[in-house]
Image (spheres, rainbow, N blue to C red):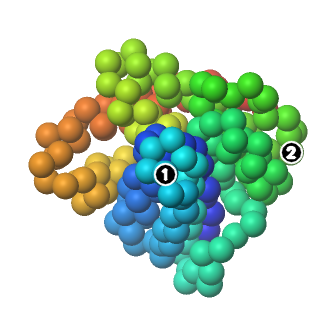
Amino acid sequence: MTEEILIAGFGGQGVLSMGKILAYAGIMKDKEVSWMPSYGPEMRGGTANVTVILSDEKISSPILNKFDTVIVLNQQSMDKFESSVKSGGCLLYDPNGITIFPTRRDINIYRIEATRLAAESGNPKVFNMIVLGAYVKAKQVVDSENVQLALEKSLPERYHKLIPLNMQAFSNGMEYLEGEFVL
């Protein structure tokens, strides 16, 4: 099994963190992993994306043109990366700020209203964990337990008190995705 994932959005949305957590969760599932971030000079507000590959076999190259899954969190990413999903692949998106919705009919399309759910929770910083929960529910490439271990590994110890909040957001994303299959 190989899963090639691209996560794209604005800096500050937790794009790179989401990729790192996914990569750590893959390592904890004994997968071969590649994590390759890409971002502009702006730390927040600029575009950012990360490629994550999880595989049972050695990974020959982290550079890809087509992906099994693309997660888009803004319109620019939708415009740029919708065509990068392999036929039969998965596109997962948050509709906040999206004005031109996905049009392809040869892929599975999932929608997660992570911005709204994060705002309703009172903590918009958990946005990325809601999206990650939806992705894990849709693709089941890593286990929830490994996501928690990955959070412990990727967050500095001073933020470990936030792990329960993040795991609740992750669970909310898994719950919300149910029945949201668009195609």
Task: Give residue 106's mark.
Answer: 2
Q: Position of residue 47 (x, y in %)?
A: 58, 49
- At label 2, which amino acid type do we have? Asp
Which secondary structure, mark 2?
A: loop
Give 132 or 29, whichever is nearer the viewer: 132
**Can you say whether 112 is above or below 131 in the image?**
above
Task: Give residue 68's mark.
Answer: none
On the rendered structure, is 83 left or right of 163? right
Mark-to-mark CA distance, 2 and 1: 35 Å
Give 1 or 95, whichever is nearer the viewer: 95
Dots 2, 1 in contact, CB < 8 A: no
Which secondary structure, mark 1?
A: loop
Q: Position of residue 112 (x, y in %)?
A: 57, 29
Quadrant for the N terminus in the image: bottom right
Task: Identify the residue at image location x=56%, y=67%.
Answer: 53
Res 165 → quadrant: top left
Quadrant for the C terminus in the image: top right
Task: Identify the residue at image location x=12%, y=49%.
Answer: 158
Front position among marks 2 and 1: 1
Q: Position of residue 21 (x, y in %)?
A: 38, 55
Label 1 Cα crowd, 10 Å radius (few <14 / some 14-19 / many 20+): few
Residue ranking furthest to the front: 41
Q: Earlier in the sequence, mark 2 or mark 1?
A: 1
Label 2 Cα crowd, 10 Å radius (few <14 / some 14-19 / many 20+): few
- At label 1, which amino acid type do we have? Glu
Task: Identify the residue at image location x=60%, y=31%.
Answer: 94
Task: Give residue 42's mark.
Answer: 1
**Can you say whether 109 is above or below 52 in the image?**
above
Residue ranking furthest to the top: 120
Q: Position of residue 141 (x, y in %)?
A: 52, 55
Task: Identify the residue at image location x=37%, y=63%.
Answer: 24
